[in-house]
Amino acid sequence: MIYLILSILSSTAIYIIFKYADKFKINTFDIIIINYITASILGFIISDIHNLNFSIFKNEWFPYSALIGVLFILLFVVIAKSSQVVGIAVTTVSNKMSVIIPIIVSIIIDPLDVLTNLKTIGIILALIAVFLTIYRKRNVNFQPHDIYLPVILFLGMGLVDSLVKFAQQNFVNDSILALFTVVLFMMAATTGIITKIILKTSFKNLINSKTFLWGVALGISNYGSLYFIIRALNHKTNSGNTFDGSIVFGINNLGVIALSVLFGLIFFKEKLLKINWIGISIACVAIYILSKT
């Protein structure tokens, strides 16, 4: 459970860093690139240097690691575009509700992840809690044909988490986890740099001290978020089995959302509606139920 808590704290730190970066008017895409470079260096430091050679291309997990890395950057672009076109509210809901996809995938591919009645109740409550906690009263004004953006985001974020689960289930044990993250974050950083070149944006801000420091902080948090959730998925219980992926993803998502909302309330003076408090309350109940299944 400690790895799951560390994953929640790391993911919440990502939210906090983005909030402060926005407050100080720092270019988000620039700190994203530095973040992935930092994360890949962290993976390099933690991994066994002797295993870092051309033979890694032959590993079965390599395509999954590379694909997840590329998707990280592409989905960030989709998030930015969706926020501009259909609004932050719809984009946020699409992003957070995508947790249902890896939950379903985990139940399908993991023979030990059985859908019991209690777990079903917990998952349903978790989805309700996600929606109510992030609900905001905003005017939704966009063209019907633009709905493809939140749909792509929903499917894309669900695909990323599902690929993480599939790779962990079949290939990524704790001994090669660090190496897996090196490839993943290096691909993300490379894709980000290529994207920056295609968009013809300046590289000057990458060496700005504020951008660099926030990017490094984000990279440490981002690395922890991925590293610890895979460790949580790999962790064996007293019975000798690993935690169910559906439970890990459900609790992780709920924990991040609830903690982020509470942090925004305390430090950024964000106002919560009654419906948000109801969502947080349901989230606590859902976490308790899932932790007991």
Image (cartoon, rainbow, N blue to C red):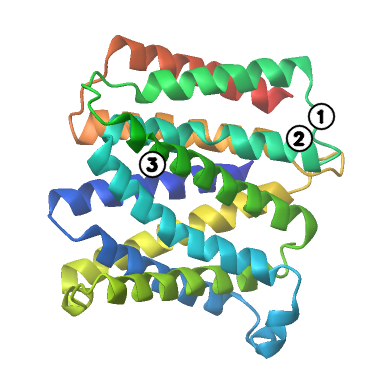
Q: Residue at horizontal 28%, vertical 21%?
A: 136
- How far apart, in angstroms, are the residues tagged by discs 2 and 3? 27 Å
- How far apart, in angstroms, are the residues tagged by discs 2 and 1? 6 Å
Q: Where residue 31 appears, x then y in whole percent?
A: 28, 64
Q: Name the quadrant of the C terminus.
A: top right
Q: Name the quadrant of the N terminus.
A: top right
SS at circle 2: helix
Mark nearer the N terminus (2 vs 3): 2
Q: Is residue 142 left or right of residue 220?
A: left
How packed is label 3: few (under 14 Cα within 10 Å), some, or many (20 or more)? some
Amino acid at pointer 2: Ile
- Above or below: residue 78 compared with residue 273: below
Q: Are marks 2 and 3 in contact (CB under 8 Å)?
A: no
* Residue 203 visible in the picture: yes
Q: Residue at horizontal 64%, vertical 47%?
A: 162
- Above or below: residue 131 compared with residue 246: above
In the foreground, 42 or 190: 190
Q: Residue at horizontal 30%, vertical 10%?
A: 274
Q: Where residue 78 appears, x then y in whole percent?
A: 37, 50
Mark nearer the N terminus (2 vs 1): 2
In the foreground, 27 or 256: 27
State the residue position of label 3.
Answer: 149
State the residue position of label 1.
Answer: 114
SS at circle 3: helix
SS at circle 1: loop
* Residue 244 visible in the picture: no
How packed is label 1: few (under 14 Cα within 10 Å), some, or many (20 or more)? some
